[in-house]
Amino acid sequence: MFQRFSFMTPSATQCIPAQFNLGTLKGRDVIANFEGGRITSDAGIVLMAELDKKLGLTARFAKCFRDHRNLSYVNYSAHELLAQRVYGIVLGYEDVNDHDKLRHDPALAIALGRLDFIDSNAALLAGKSTINRLEYCPETILDQRESRYHKIEHQPKEIEKAFVEIFLESYKQPPRQIVLDMDVTDDQVHGSQEGAFFNTYYNGVCYAPLYIFCGRHLLAALLRPSNVDPAAGALSELQRIIGIIRGQWQKTQILVRGDSAYAREDIMKFCESESGVDYVFAMATNSQLKLRAHNVIQKAQADYEQRLARVTALIETVFAPDDKPESVSQLVPEATWYRSLCYKTQESWSRKRRVVTKVCYGSKGLKLRHVVTSLPAAKVPPSQVYTDKYCPRGEMENRLKEQQLDLFADRTSTQTFESNQLRLWLSAMAYVLMQAFRQHCLARTSLAQATVGTIRLTLLKFGAKITVSVRRVLIAIASACPYQDILAIAYQRLQVIPAPG
């Protein structure tokens, strides 16, 4: 007969020991208790909130929502709810349920301006149920004004526009050139979410969100079902974003970049029709492109074999026959050649376009890579098109990792598609806030290129004791805080940013 054991998380009503005896240290008892007072492990959020107030990021985000609640019964404005949710994501709390604990955090209360510390046991901030009414978008509700629980309505078009406008305002003057990177990633789901399908490429049930970045700036985060074309929605997003950019930056050169999924006639034709807009997209190889690169392939092969012969001859003079390396060919770097040609597909393209071919020949044989571009050959040679214009596109992968691994953009676990799109935008707004902190406060420091996760760990997650008196609120940071110098720099730069209004 087996005995059944139950492992459960202790509930709040269970008895918690007054103190923990952790042994002795040099004859002294080591005791731990819960009598430290108002102590937080998220003290850095106060700096982040100060930057948010000066730039007005969450305030702008809140303007994209319509609040149909009776204000006489409201304890938390839509802006406060949004800011609390975004700050929670920034601090590393991915779920709405986390806010039942966070609502007691004094640092988060200070960041949100909730300074009513009269009752130390009071729940100062919104709990999970209140914030969930902001996020949850049941498909059965047609009019939020008549709904009993869901009275805060988000405006998708305004949210999409806000991301681009925040990007434009991050520049003091229009840049000479910008690069728009497009890419799609998988968002694996583990339930019966609306719009989630099995995708053979990603080998799972998932969404396929489309992202558009300009460097480290996020311009678009579009949630899509995974059963659509990889380029679905890309053209309309480009048209929308470039239209907003052109409204303020008429002379800025725009380069649109993406992998082979975006080498489509409609996308390339749109870029060609716009003044000052170029593109560079990867292309899949085919027999015709390989045939037209035949002479370059021969040159690359001859180049590699010639260098291999020289290395082989050198090794034979240095090593005895029994001591020679087994694979001499791997010691010789592959030969790389480039070729630019004018090419048109048989049916899908309406005109001839410039295709740059990269030919690599080495110990593993032949490798061909192609990109199609509108950049003229007279200004940009083939090698520069591939290495300088296209290859830096890989940096966008780091932005996607920050979104999903550090800011939980893949936490799309609600039932409806609309709710999951809103969750994606909340994560995107958390990224925008972190990028603003990186840009305004960390430039030319050791954390200037740090990831969101590193910034959170070093500058947001540190301990402090909070003391409230009649005249002041004191945040006493731990004396052993290892990044005091960078915190001081961030504070000094925050003071320089003018207050709104």
Image (spheres, grey):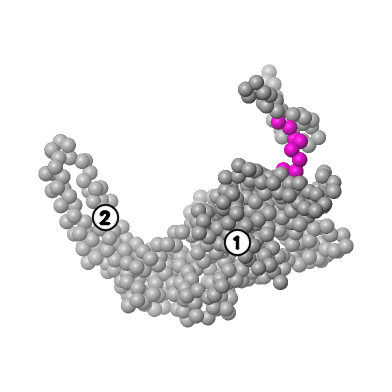
**Quadrant location of residue 19?**
top right
As displayed, is residue 238 above or below residue 103?
below
Asked whether the beta carbons under mark 1 and mark 2 sit within 8 Å of each other, the answer is no
- Residue at the extreme right: 72
At a point 40% along the width and 75% down the height, the residue shown is 374
* Label tally: 2
Secondary structure found at label 2: loop
As displayed, is residue 406 above or below residue 499?
above
Secondary structure found at label 1: helix
Residue 392 rendering spot, x and y as whole percentages: 42, 62
Residue 128 rendering spot, x and y as whole percentages: 75, 50
At a point 71% along the width and 49% down the height, the residue shown is 475
Number of other residues with Cα within 10 Å of mark 1, as a class: few under 14, some 14 to 19, many 20 or more: some
The answer to whether residue 138 shows anywhere in this view is: no
**Quadrant location of residue 278?**
bottom left
Residue type at mark 1 is Arg
Residue situated in front as seen by the camera: 92 or 160:
92
Check residue 37 for magenta coloring: yes
Q: Quadrant of the N terminus?
A: top right
Between circles 1 and 2, the one closer to the viewer is 1
Q: Which residue is mark 1?
A: 493
Residue type at mark 2 is Glu
State the separation of the CA atoms marked 1 and 2: 48 Å
- Residue at the extreme left: 317
Q: Which residue is mark 2?
A: 334
Q: Which residues, given as a range, are shown in magenta? A: 32-39
Residue 65 rendering spot, x and y as whole percentages: 73, 66
